[in-house]
Amino acid sequence: MENQNKEWTAVRQPTKITRLLKLGTGVRVELDFIDALSEEEGILIGNTCKGFVKAMSENREVDTYPRRVFRINAGALHQYVYMRDGTTKYLAEVEPGDEITVFSPDGFRTAFVGRVKKEKRPLWRIELENGISATVQEADSVYLEGDGSSSAFVGLTEGGSLSSYPAESCGRHKGEAVAEYIEEM
């Protein structure tokens, strides 16, 4: 796997789910890439600069939805997504042509976004014991990286485990890491 992003240093950690909170209906973002993604590939998303969880590709067939080898349901539009250049961007700001880092067990690579699709969907907030959180759609096609395998959102429980990727530096301003005090919840 080609490692194009030299800035990535976070390490995957199995982390306990402390809270699942139903938020109601909001805008979620699907990213369609111009390349096929494997079942093990995904992107890093998160509510705050504390860190990320890995949203997996839809390269698996589920009861309600066919396989989409090019798509990742990335969750709520307010979240950060980790970009190719080491910055973050709000999902609301992602555009066709953007380069996003796609992670797999073998490393990471760049993938270009071909289409951004936004729709109103039921959303849930997932909170982890290390303070990392994410907001994702309630759907059986939404998978997140678990401890050694992918976990369907609909199968998650409080006390269960997801992989998290704590950020080295928690401050971000306009997507760039900054050395200042910033508190987010």
Image: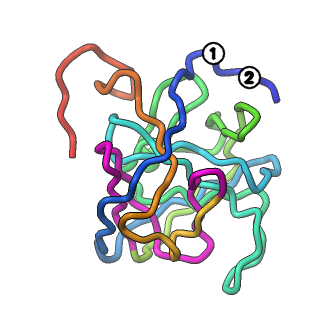
Between the C-alphas of marks 2 and 1, the distance is: 7 Å
Residue 99 appears at what percent x and percent y? 64, 34
Residue 184 appears at what percent x and percent y? 21, 40
Query: Does 146 lie within the magenta span?
Result: yes
Report crowding for label 1: few under 14, some 14 to 19, many 20 or more residues within 10 A (C-alpha): few
Report crowding for label 2: few under 14, some 14 to 19, many 20 or more residues within 10 A (C-alpha): few
Location of the N terminus by quadrant is top right
Q: Residue at x 79, y 52 (%)?
A: 38
Name the one closer to the observer, 185 or 121. Answer: 185
Does residue 173 appear in the picture of this structure? no
Q: Which residue is mark 1?
A: 6
Q: Quadrant of residue 7?
A: top right
Q: Which structural element holds mark 1? A: loop
Residue 120's disc number: none
Q: Which structural element holds mark 2? A: loop
Residue 85 appears at what percent x and percent y? 57, 22
Q: Residue at x 36, y 60 (%)?
A: 126
Name the one closer to the observer, 150 or 183. Answer: 150
Q: Quadrant of residue 26?
A: bottom left
Residue 50 appears at what percent x and percent y? 33, 35
Q: Which residue is mark 2?
A: 3
Name which residue type carries label 1: Lys
- Seen in the picture, residue 81 relative to 138 is either above or below; the reply is above
- Seen in the picture, residue 20 relative to 140 is either above or below; the reply is above
Query: Does 132 lie within the magenta span?
Result: yes
Name which residue type carries label 2: Asn
Q: Quadrant of residue 90?
A: top left
Q: Is residue 59 left or right of residue 55?
A: right
- Seen in the picture, residue 3 relative to 122 is either above or below; the reply is above
Q: Residue at x 49, y 46 (%)?
A: 14
Task: Verify CB contact (< 8 Å) between mark 2 and mark 1.
Answer: yes
Which segment is the magenta one? 123-149
